[in-house]
Amino acid sequence: MEKEKVLNLVTEALNKSGGDESKAADILMAMAEDEPELMLEFLNHGVTALRAIAEGQLATKH
């Protein structure tokens, strides 16, 4: 799955959850029902790693 797409989905989940990683994980799992590749990314890396990637990417954009 493209890194940019993962970043967008993780950012969307974190925004919807108000930054709560546990809620973001639930949101990502719900998204993964429609995005099988996201499920694989999520299982391989977990929300904490994906959040770190997202924050790093976002930090470079600001």
Image: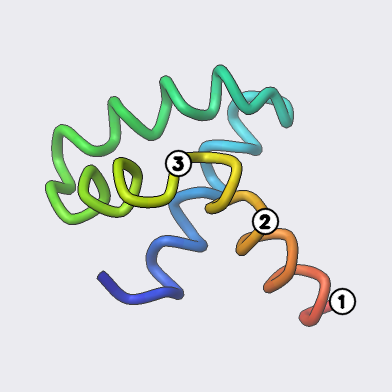
Asked whether, in this view, residue 57 is left or right of residue 47, the answer is right
- Gap between marks 2 and 3, in whole Å? 10 Å
- Mark 2: few, some, or many residues within 10 Å (few <14, many ≥20)? few
Q: Which residue was labeled with disc 3?
A: 46
Q: Which residue was labeled with disc 2?
A: 52
Vertical placement of 13 versus 58: above or below?
above
SS label for mark 3: helix
Q: Nearer the viewer, mark 1 or mark 2?
A: 2
**Badge 2 or badge 3: first in the primary sequence:** 3
SS label for mark 1: loop
Query: Looking at numbered disc 3 in the image, what kind of residue is underneath it?
Result: Gly
Q: Which residue was labeled with disc 1?
A: 62
Tell me the residue at 73%/60% (across/down). Answer: 55
Give the x, y percent position of residue 57: 68, 73
Query: Looking at numbered disc 2 in the image, what kind of residue is underneath it?
Result: Ala
SS label for mark 2: helix
- Mark 1: few, some, or many residues within 10 Å (few <14, many ≥20)? few
Which labelled disc corresponds to residue 30? none
